[in-house]
Image (cartoon, rainbow, N blue to C red):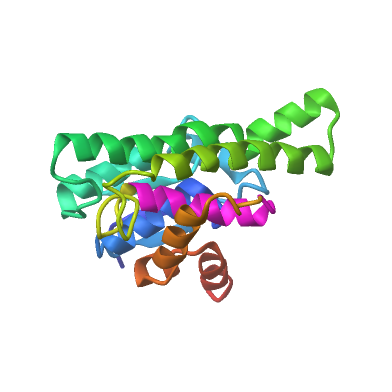
Amino acid sequence: MSDTVLYDYWRSSASYRLRIALNMAAETFRTVPVDILAKEHRAQEHLARNPQGLVPVLEIDGHSFTQSLAVIEYLDETRGGAFLPGDSVGRQRVRALSYVIAMEIHPVCNTHVVGHVLSLTGGGDDARLAWMQKFIGEGLAAFEILLNSPSTDTFCHGDRPGMADICLVPQVYNARRWSVDLSACPKLVEIADRCAELKPFANAHPDKARSDRAAR
């Protein structure tokens, strides 16, 4: 049994990112599901792992880590994942692309944020859908423009997938889940679909994560 343990929720974007990164780094790990719908992330057992009550949490190398992008950079440093390019300008660009998703789109579309807004405003399912479409759509439209760079190649930066692609794929999954119009984002859709064909991405997909756990 692997000593590396990922506490995650199958549909969590941040968890999806870490599953991809761990697969790309060829790191063997086992998952312990934390059911957000059942509010297991707010239980004391999980709060002891992460006081924010968020997923994922990764136990690796005798440490317990939170915050998916920080963990991805740890894997890059310790496992040679090549998730970030070797030059300073390239690393800045990949981080900027990653942050567009992980620090701008993702937080305002998180379940507890949207749920709180709707509880304050009395909004229902239509309001939730409109919220998701607005913030995911606007964020990805900006991401598409940022891809208009000589540094964009087969993937977001260069000819191999990195941290920006690891962030992009779960966000495109969410965009499709919420019926976001991606017609103005052909490049990012092309890149996300190309990544989805790669084994580390395919094996991290939420549907596979859910079915694997159901089969246990």
Q: Is residue 62 visible?
A: no
Q: Is residue 176 above or below residue 49?
A: below
Callout count = 0
Q: At x 66% / y 51%, what residue is drawn?
A: 181
Q: At x 24% / y 49%, what residue is drawn?
A: 75
Prevailing secondary structure of the magenta residues: helix
- Across and down, in percent, residue 59 comes to 32, 48
Picture quadrant where residue 28 is located? bottom left
Q: Nearer the viewer, residue 141 or 105?
A: 141
- Across and down, in percent, residue 34 comes to 54, 51
Q: Which stretch is magenta? A: 164-180
Q: Is residue 21 above or below residue 105?
A: below
Q: Nearer the viewer, residue 32 or 97?
A: 97
Q: At x 75% / y 44%, what residue is drawn?
A: 129
- Across and down, in percent, residue 125 comes to 82, 43
Indicate yes or no whether the magenta region holds residue 12. Answer: no
